[in-house]
Amino acid sequence: MAGTKKSGNNNQLLMTLLKGRTFIVLIILFIFFSITANNFLTAGALLSIAKHVALYGILAVGMTYVIITGGIDLSVGSVAGLAGMIAGGFIEQGLTLKMFGVTVYFSVPLLVLITVLLGGLMGMLNGLIITKFNVAPFIATLGTMYIWRGLANIRSNGATFSQLAGHEGLGNTGFNFFGSNLGGTSIPVGVVIMAIIAVLAGIVLKKTPFGWHVLSIGGNEKASKLSGIKVDRVKIWVYAFSGFCAAVVGIIATSQLVAAHPATGESWEMNAIASSVLGGTSMAGGVGNIGGTIVGAFVIGVINDGMTMCGVTEFWQQIIRGLVIIVAVIIDQFQRNLQAKMALQARNENK
Amino acid sequence: MKGFKKVLAMLLAVAMVAAMVMGCSGGDDAKEEAPKDDAQTESTDNGGEEEAAPEEDTQAEALKGGGSNIIYIITPSVSNPAFKAEADTATAKAKELGYEVKAVSHDDDPTKQTEAFDNAIADKAAAIVCDNAGADATIEAVKKARDAQIPTFLIDREINEEGVAISQIVANNYQGAKAIAEEFVVAMGEKGKYVELLGKESDTNAGVRSSAFHEVIDQYPDMEMVAQQTANWEQTEAFDKMEAILQSNPDINGVICGNDTMMQGACAALDAAGLNLPVIGVDGSDEAAALIKDGKATGTALQQFAVIASMAVEQADKYLKEGSTGLDEKQLVDCIAITKDNVDKLSGFVFTE
């Protein structure tokens, strides 16, 4: 009896460690890089990592929702690029209404609102294609990934919008706010935006019926449908949210560069997926949480910046990133098996 | 199995303890660095004022560097041999001059490039040598480095603003493309139909090279361009485009390409079709040299990547020591026209007389 109890305790300790594995990995990485890279553990370096993490961290929050429903959104990088081009185009060229012969210049808050709403619509279109036409999410979003990237290039014919400072006379100055630091402090605005989006998304997922519906659809779509959940509607909103997040990222990225480049966001979807998976989101759907995703995003960010500051070449960086992702998923599986075993054990003991 | 778990648990526990111990010592480091950081923020403020009148202050006040002895070398992906030559030469030169080097690649992604600049600033780099990822998208990153007292030396590609970087050393694409276009006209016998494969249209170099080609070729009324397509600097794309063009224009007499990678693709397509025509490129890669030796290509314009890269590092060194490079910001390095007469002297982007 005592023996069983002891092993139960051991299991529990192991469980706690496994649940916090991404966090432990993050801490180990921090220690490793603060030893190997001289200036890694300074406020400046850490803030710049947070700033970089903000970009794919926000993408990853939207991606986590999508993956929890059992889907995937490959179009986020392209949506970010197109959103940047839309916002940049509005500032530099305005919106010309040919029929009235006028060019309208929007103020920055308005054009940001329009851009993120368009981003939401782009995501919604993904959702519609997936639910109404029954196309696999991988295929649907692969298709839209190409479409949005093409449109981003068409918008400027492959050129870069670089006059993003705006004109006082046109009342559209202030776009660089999103790439700057929060008034007086050295906290980048992007990080604050990520924090807000992550907290809200985390609360919605855990505490509201919508969040429960998202989790239950991923767990068992058919059962959810039969119990009265409007599966299609929930999915469309989830993809819309992912598009919205991508558009926000597009705005932050272009604002940081003070230039809208049509190739912005190429292959960022992979970072977003990796962050979600590192954070414990199951590709099979039904499992995941936002906090884990953010920690996962930080793991990737710390690896990227840390290795750069160590002077590790690009090719090795790719290998290490790949290894970390695979090992994370292996541990994830290990934990899930253990969890199932413990549940069984608990049930047996109660008998 | 149980034993394995125990071992794993032990290991993780040890790791955590180590984390706490080292976390503390790391914290001390952070404290030590803190005052320096304040200094950096102050200088950032100064930098902000400087920005208002960059031109005057450029000469008056030299940037001191971030404080460390590290030179950051930021280039496009080194899977392209030209950029590898560039990064390797710069690294070797900087090491020779006694600097610590960190070479980073930005994969032509401006955001990734900004991250590399941020890392360099956080790392208190002495100087940055950069082959940039976009004429407009790079300006802000260079400005940020400037605000942090780090001088930037741009190589190979320019940016659309002067007075931000210390040097902009680029190959004279215009002169190089013209020189090799002349060889092309000779090889064609001043007449015939030809095809042009353009580089990525968003890249200024693509436009510069194309207009230089045409400035020479268009002087000859018997030279006729029958197709013009972009192949985005890429080999596979050039191969596909070339095969498609050959379907509609089987009677072409020559091909001009915006770079050597596209020239390789075009030559492969011509080879597959059993054709051997005059083909020119720009860059001067070893692959192009091999094609020229085999008689499959006419020539290429060597951009002296290695020379440019080591010039940049030398200027960085001089600037950090003396506060000025003593040279103009924009510097052009002439290209060398490579044909089968002088191709033997070319190896790894280095032309030895």
Image (tube, helix red, strand yellow):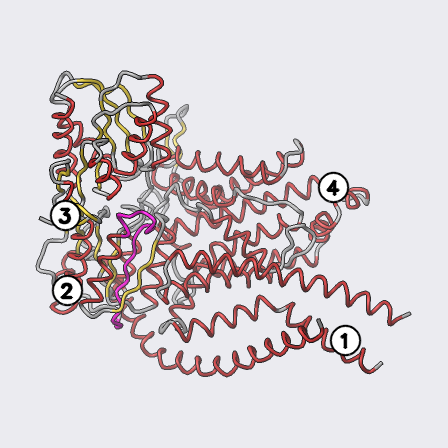
Residue that badge 3 annotates? B351
Which image quadrant for residue B190?
A: top left
For the residues marked 2 and 1, what is the alpha-carbon distance in whole angstroms?
66 Å
Q: Callout 4: residue from which chain?
A: A
A31 magenta-colored: no
Q: Nearer the viewer, mark 2 or mark 1?
A: 1
Q: Nearer the viewer, mark 2 or mark 4?
A: 2
Q: Callout 1: residue from which chain?
A: A
Q: Position of residue A329 (x, y in %)?
A: 61, 58
Count residues near mark 3 (Cα–Cα under 10 Å), then give few for <14, some for 14-19, many for 20+: some
Q: Position of residue A92 (x, y in %)?
A: 34, 40
Q: Callout 3: residue from which chain?
A: B
Q: Is residue A285 above or below residue A22?
A: above
Total numbered circles: 4
Q: Secondary structure at mark 2?
A: helix
Amino acid type shown at disc 4: Lys
- For the question of whether residue B57 can be seen, the reply is no
Residue at horizontal 64 percent and vertical 51 percent from the top: A283
Q: Going by the picture, which residue comes out furthest to the front?
A: B294
Discs 4 and 1 carry the same chain letter? yes
Q: Check if mark 2's residue and mark 4's residue have beta carbons within 8 Å.
A: no
Disc nearer the start of the sequence (4/1): 1
Residue that badge 4 annotates? A230
Discs 3 and 1 carry the same chain letter? no
Residue that badge 2 annotates? B319
For the residues marked 4 and 1, what is the alpha-carbon distance in whole angstroms?
41 Å
Residue at horizontal 15 percent and vertical 38 percent from the top: B338
Residue range of the region highlighted in magenta in the rendering: B67-84
Of residue A5 and residue A183, the one placed in the foreground of this image is A5
Residue that badge 1 annotates? A8
Of residue B52 and residue A305, the one placed in the foreground of this image is A305
Of residue A43 and residue B196, the one placed in the foreground of this image is B196
